[in-house]
């Protein structure tokens, strides 16, 4: 899978995506990351890519020209236009379903804004998706872009060592992940749940499923509206609700 990031701060992207799982995925060829410095496409001898906003106001606005020229350099590498994600608090909030959708693409371009934003004419010409990572404002789109690249990459074959890791974790079936434990068996007086030591796989799976339901119900009940639930799951949730009313 090919990721392209259009940014004013290429080192930030390269360093943030060059270590741990993402770094290893680039080394083994599971993903490819290309970073484009928008300043390289400035027509100003000083490399300026911003100017004052028409109509007045605070801050500066990134110019359409450098952004569009930078994109055209990327666009020329492919027969079909790649999907372009503009990282903005005005976009749809990123979630696991979106990560899965984006992971099915061969090429993704992330456009990172800065200052007071980007000239609207550039956005209208090249952007296909407006995406946010939450209802707050950051100084630029680089961190959100890296968050999304990380989440999407985990779903690309070959990125994770354990084939089950990407599937059976938080947000599988729209549920939060169950609690995890490792050695020692007793830590500061707290024991690992006995069921996990039993070796009885059916009981372990039942416990884990119930813990996922419980954790989601306690911490993110909004997720249950779209969760994939069977009759046993619904019965367990009813039990939780009854216990709460007692």
Image (cartoon, rainbow, N blue to C red):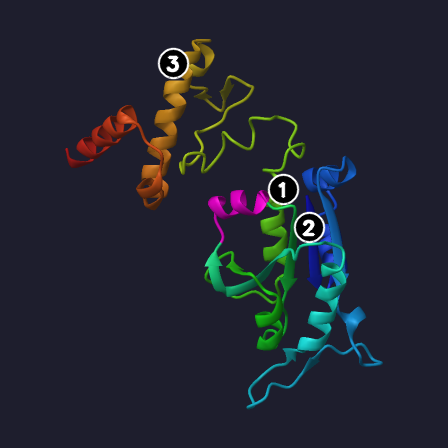
Residue at x 67% of width, y 55% of height:
80
Say above or below: 93 vs 161.
Answer: below
Closer to the chain start, of discs 3 and 2, is: 2
Q: CA distance from mark 1 to mark 2?
A: 9 Å
What x and y, as percent, mark residue 238? 21, 31
Task: Determine whether, in the image, residue 115 is placed left or right of residue 171.
Answer: right
Say above or below: 158 vs 133.
Answer: above
Q: Magenta region: which residues? A: 94-104
The circle on residue 104 is none
Query: Please, which residue is most extreme toward the top here?
Result: 199
- Residue nearest the observer in this picture, 138 or 81: 81
| Magenta span includes 35 | no
Q: Quadrant of residue 198?
A: top left
Quadrant for the C terminus, please.
top left
Q: Which residue is mark 2?
A: 3
Q: Which residue is mark 1?
A: 153
Residue at x 43% of width, y 29% of height:
178
Mark 1 in CB contact with mark 2 (< 8 angstroms): yes
């Amino acid at each position: 899978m090919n990721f392209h990031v259009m940014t004013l701060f290429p080192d930030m992207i390269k360093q943030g995506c060059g270590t741990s799982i993402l770094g290893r995925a680039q080394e083994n060829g599971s993903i490819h990351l290309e970073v484009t410095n928008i300043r390289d496409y400035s027509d100003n001898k000083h490399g300026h890519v911003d100017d004052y906003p028409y109509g007045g106001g605070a801050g500066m606005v990134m110019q359409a020209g450098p952004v569009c020229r930078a994109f055209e350099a990327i666009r020329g590498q492919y027969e079909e236009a790649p999907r372009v994600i503009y990282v903005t608090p005005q976009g749809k909030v990123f979630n696991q379903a979106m990560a899965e959708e984006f992971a099915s693409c061969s090429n993704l371009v992330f456009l990172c804004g800065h200052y007071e934003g980007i000239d609207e004419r550039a956005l209208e010409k090249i952007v296909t998706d407006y995406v946010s990572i939450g209802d707050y404002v950051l100084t630029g789109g680089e961190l959100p872009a890296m968050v999304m690249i990380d989440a999407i990459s985990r779903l690309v074959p070959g990125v994770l060592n354990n084939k089950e890791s990407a599937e059976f974790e938080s947000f599988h079936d729209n549920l939060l992940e169950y609690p995890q434990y490792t050695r020692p068996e007793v830590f500061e007086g707290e024991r690992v749940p006995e069921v996990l030591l039993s070796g009885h796989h059916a009981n372990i799976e039942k416990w884990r499923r119930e813990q996922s339901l419980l954790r989601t119900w306690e911490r993110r009940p909004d997720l249950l509206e779209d969760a994939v639930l069977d009759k046993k799951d619904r019965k367990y949730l009813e039990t939780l609700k009854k216990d709460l009313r007692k």
